[in-house]
Image (spheres, helix red, strand yellow):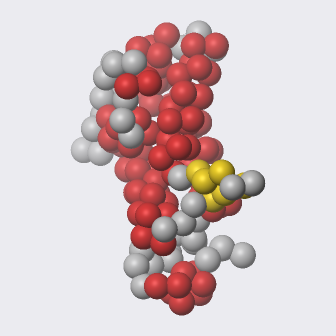
Amino acid sequence: MTTPHQEQAARLAELWHRLSAQHIALGCSCGMSGISVTLEDFERDIADYLWAESERLGQARVVDFLLAPGPMAEQERAIRAILARLEAGQADDEVADWLLARMSKTIESYAKLHGPAPEAPLLGGSSAWRKAYRS
């Protein structure tokens, strides 16, 4: 039986996947002053934030969960991996609550600012995107 935490992690993983695929499919990068930033750049920053914030707030079990696969700097696609572990039910309720609250806010905010509406097609060219892009 799937728990609400697992369902939320699956929904966030799907949203993150859509954002990543759409950025790659369109060759899109959000840039300022000639600096190109991709979704993967944000992934490391978000994971580092979760780790630093959990340490700062004394959330030892969250820190242990985040670092279980190894040092954060060595974790490839850390956000995807964290969401996959949450979706697999590898975190207790307290750890899942803490992480999912922050990850939801971060990923949904990113999607609202940089992504298409959730119902937008994953593929279909610029015409399909324009029709479903957030206003």
| Residue 20 position (above or below residue 56) | below
Can residue 129 be seen from the camera position used here? Answer: yes
Instruction: Give the farthest residue toward the bottom.
Output: 127
Q: Position of residue 79 (x, y in %)?
A: 44, 39
| Residue 69 position (above or below residue 79) | above
Instruction: Give the farthest residue toward the right.
Output: 33
**Which of these two is toward me, 77 or 97?**
77
**Which of these two is toward me, 110 or 98?**
110
Q: Residue at x 45, y 30 (%)?
A: 96
Q: Residue at x 59, y 28 (%)?
A: 49
Instruction: Give the farthest residue toward the left.
Output: 1
**Which of these two is toward me, 1 or 14?**
14
Q: Residue at x 46, y 85 (%)?
A: 125
Tally of marks: 0
Can residue 22 be seen from the camera position used here? Answer: no
Q: Residue at x 61, y 77 (%)?
A: 133
In which quadrant of the rendered view does residue 6 lie? Answer: top left
User: Where is the C terminus found, in terms of image quarters?
Assistant: bottom right
| Residue 6 position (above or below residue 27) | above
Q: Position of residue 83 (x, y in %)?
A: 39, 40
User: Where is the N terminus found, in terms of image quarters?
Assistant: top left
In which quadrant of the rendered view does residue 131 lie? Answer: bottom right
**Which of these two is toward me, 14 or 128?**
128
Q: Position of residue 19 (x, y in %)?
A: 49, 60
Q: Position of residue 87 (x, y in %)?
A: 33, 41
Relative placement, left or right, of 7 versus 41 is: left
